[in-house]
Image (spheres, grey):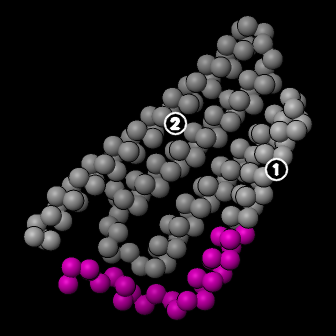
């Protein structure tokens, strides 16, 4: 029974990952279009462009993180076989994903800091907290990489299929 369900599970999960990846990309494109429209509207109606621009940059940063997440899902779940990966490939994947989160969080914190200095300085505390968490995540990633580099190097023995 276990062997008969595996192809069904693989097909359903593949459909899910493809659908999720396409949906994420479409949402990111929607955010990009919204940001551009907001800036154009601000320029044509002579609104405070700096506030709209900062909000648009925030949307673009979130869109960037969404696109990178979609690319990560596509690479990890659609284009590659997970059962045949080595531990070093797994470490690289995790490092790449955490790096996406750190970059997006740092950029969002910077946008929030610029916005807070223009509007309400008391909100800078939240931006600083996000930036602190992003830097803490970066330090943790460095510790993870340092510790994982101490583990025995891959000898190719991890490429054994699980079904055997």
Along the horizontal axis of the image, is 79 left or right of 41?
left
Q: What are the residue bounds of the magenta stretch? A: 139-164
| Residue 61 vertical placement versus 11 (above, below) | above
Question: Residue 54 occupies which quadrant of the picture?
Answer: top right
Q: Residues within 10 Å of mark 1 (few under 14, many from 20)?
A: some
Farthest residue in the top direction? Answer: 45
| Residue for point 15% across, 71% down | 2
State if disc 1 and disc 2 touch (CB < 8 Å). no
Taking the magenta stretch, the answer to whether it contains residue 123 is no
Query: Looking at the figure, which quarter contains the N terminus?
Result: bottom left
| Residue for point 16% across, 58% down | 8
Q: What is the number of the mark on residue 128? A: 1
Q: Nearer the viewer, residue 7 or 120?
A: 120
| Residue for point 86% across, 29% down | 119
| Residue for point 68% across, 36% down | 58
Question: Residue 140 occupies which quadrant of the picture?
Answer: bottom right
Q: Position of residue 41 (x, y in %)?
A: 67, 13
Query: Looking at the figure, which quarter contains the C terminus?
Result: bottom left
Q: Position of residue 69 (x, y in %)?
A: 50, 51
Distance from label 2 to label 1 (Cα)? 26 Å
Q: Is residue 114 visible to the viewer in this orientation of the structure?
A: no
Q: What is the number of the mark on residue 152? A: none
Along the horizontal axis of the image, is 112 left or right of 96?
right
| Residue 162 vertical placement versus 77 (above, below) | below
Q: Position of residue 123 (x, y in %)?
A: 83, 39
| Residue bearing the label numbered 2 | 28
Q: Is residue 147 visible to the viewer in this orientation of the structure?
A: yes
Taking the magenta stretch, the answer to whether it contains residue 148 is yes
| Residue 90 vertical placement versus 61 (above, below) | below
Q: Nearer the viewer, residue 121 or 154?
A: 121
Mark nearer the N terminus (2 vs 1): 2
Give the secondary structure at mark 1: helix
């Amino acid at each position: 029974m276990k062997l008969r369900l595996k192809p069904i599970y693989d097909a359903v999960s593949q459909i899910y990952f493809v659908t999720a990846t396409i949906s994420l990309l479409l949402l990111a494109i929607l955010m990009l279009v919204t940001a551009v429209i907001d800036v154009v509207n601000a320029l044509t109606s002579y609104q405070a462009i700096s506030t709209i621009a900062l909000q648009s940059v925030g949307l673009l940063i979130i869109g960037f993180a969404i696109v990178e997440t979609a690319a990560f899902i596509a690479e990890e779940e659609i284009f590659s076989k997970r059962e045949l990966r080595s531990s070093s490939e797994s470490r690289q994947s995790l490092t790449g994903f955490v790096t996406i989160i750190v970059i997006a969080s740092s950029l969002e914190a910077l946008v929030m800091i610029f916005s807070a200095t223009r509007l309400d300085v008391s909100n800078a505390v939240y931006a600083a907290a996000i930036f602190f968490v992003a830097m803490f995540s970066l330090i943790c990633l460095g510790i993870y990489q340092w510790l994982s580099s101490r583990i025995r190097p891959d000898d190719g023995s991890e490429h054994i299929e699980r079904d055997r």
